[in-house]
Image: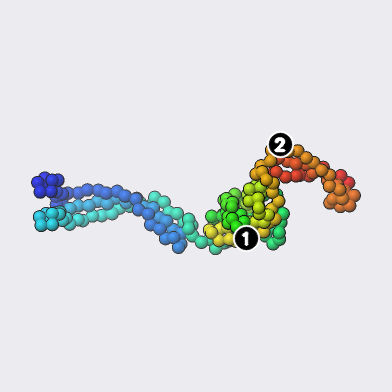
Amino acid sequence: MYDESTQFSLPQAGCEYQAFYTGVLTEENVGLRVITEVTEDITYTNVTWNGDNQKVSAALEGTLTGEVKRIDLGFSAVDNNRRATLENPASDSHSRVSGIGQITGWACSDLDLEIQIYVSGYGVVERFPVPHGVSRADTEEVCGDALNGFSAVSNWNRIPQDSDEALVHLVQQGKIIATASVQVVHFEDEFIRGAEGSAVVYDFPEPGQSVTIEWVQGLQNFVITEFQE
């Protein structure tokens, strides 16, 4: 029925319509998110026009039917199994680092696991997720499985040039769970190209022995290429 006063067709009692929408329910403190697709079938049971207020009033009856499409668990939950060790660089001493090096260790859980490199006066200068899942049989008793090793690559030449010390934080869900203090030796360039060089280190690792070290561009560092007794 078209109503001249409202300039549109009024809904009639007994008319039906269907609405569809997606609902998201979250419980962040327990890390639960439920996504539900809902269909709502509605019937007008009474429709009246209030000329004084210039509005339509309607009574409605309806039913909801829905389907749970996805349940996410742990997206913001606190993982209590934060057992982890930062092995390289060592978390209990001042290590010297240079060039491109590995940050390694193990963690029972990979939930929101990342490395943050902090420099005094600059704050966090590097942050990156930790590739996790390397087989480590020595962690099985603690973690309940063996796939807990991690390894990440850092270019120490990216540390600000006026800083020679940094803190390497292993962070999970915003909480620092392990830290190593490192002394950084870096070059002026972030990545040196075309350089060559080698040297012999005598009486290493034992008196009368020697090793030859050679520059490797990809590592931005020297590696042992020969051992002599």
Residue 144 in sight in this render: no
Check disc 2 and give the amino acid type: Gly
Q: Residue at x 35, y 53 (%)?
A: 23
Is residue 175 left or right of 18 when viewed as pictured? right
Q: Residue at x 88, y 46 (%)?
A: 229
Q: Residue at x 78, y 40 (%)?
A: 197
- If you read the primary sequence from the N terminus, does the residue marked by circle 1 or circle 2 appear first? 1
Viewer-nearest of discs 1 and 2: 2
How many labels, in total?
2
Q: Residue at x 63, y 51 (%)?
A: 160
Q: Residues within 10 Å of mark 2 (few under 14, many from 20)?
A: few
Residue 112 in sight in this render: yes
Is residue 93 left or right of 58 when viewed as pictured? right
Closest to the observer, 84 or 193: 193
- Picture coordinates of residue 228 (x, y %)? 86, 44
Rendered image: mark on residue 8: none
Is residue 96 left or right of 34 when viewed as pictured? right
Give the farthest residue toward the front: 162
Closest to the observer, 221 or 37: 221
- Picture coordinates of residue 40 (x, y %)? 27, 51
- Picture coordinates of residue 164 (x, y %)? 68, 54
Residue on which disc 1 sits = 178
Rendered image: mark on residue 194: 2
* Secondary structure of residue under mark 1: strand
Give the farthest residue toward the top: 194
- Picture coordinates of residue 21 (x, y %)? 31, 50
